[in-house]
Image: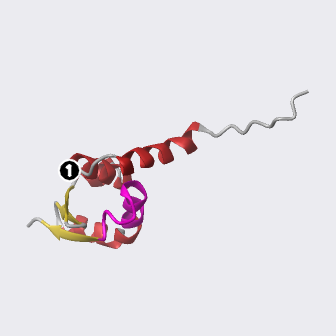
Amino acid sequence: MNDKIERVIPLSSAVPGAVAEILRRSPLSPGKVAFAWRAVVGPALERVTAVRLDGGVLIVEARTPLWAREVSRSSRIILNRLRALLGETTVSRIEVRDRL
């Protein structure tokens, strides 16, 4: 009889951690930032925004003032999720703008 207990980790639990680890280790690029943004906010919000990282500040340009307000309201959660994917010091804050 085998006394060794094997612990099976569901794939759905392992993948987010693996993706975050790969992202943190890869060089910072606009594509990496865009990928992390989409992963954090989802495709609907990604379609109505454009992002760029400028000296640790994530500049978010929203298509309308309404979308800018939505991003602003969720910015604390978004920032925490981005830090988990990109590293704690990569994004210091989020600045939201609307493109009027």
In this rendering, the count of numbered labels is 1
Image position, residue 89 (x, y; %): 35, 66
Q: Residue at x 40, y 54 (%)?
A: 85
Pick the front one: 62 or 3:
3
Q: What residue sits right under mark 1 in the picture?
A: 30
Q: Quadrant of residue 5?
A: top right
Q: Is residue 83 magenta?
A: yes
Is 29 on the left-hand or right-hand side of 19? left
Of helix, strand and loop, which one carries label 1? helix
Type of residue at label 1? Pro
Q: Residue at x 22, y 49 (%)?
A: 29
Relative to 36, residue 14 above or below: above
Pick the front one: 24 or 83:
24
Q: Quadrant of residue 37?
A: bottom left
Q: Residue furthest right?
A: 1
Q: Residue at x 57, y 44 (%)?
A: 13
Which residues make up the magenta segment?
78-92
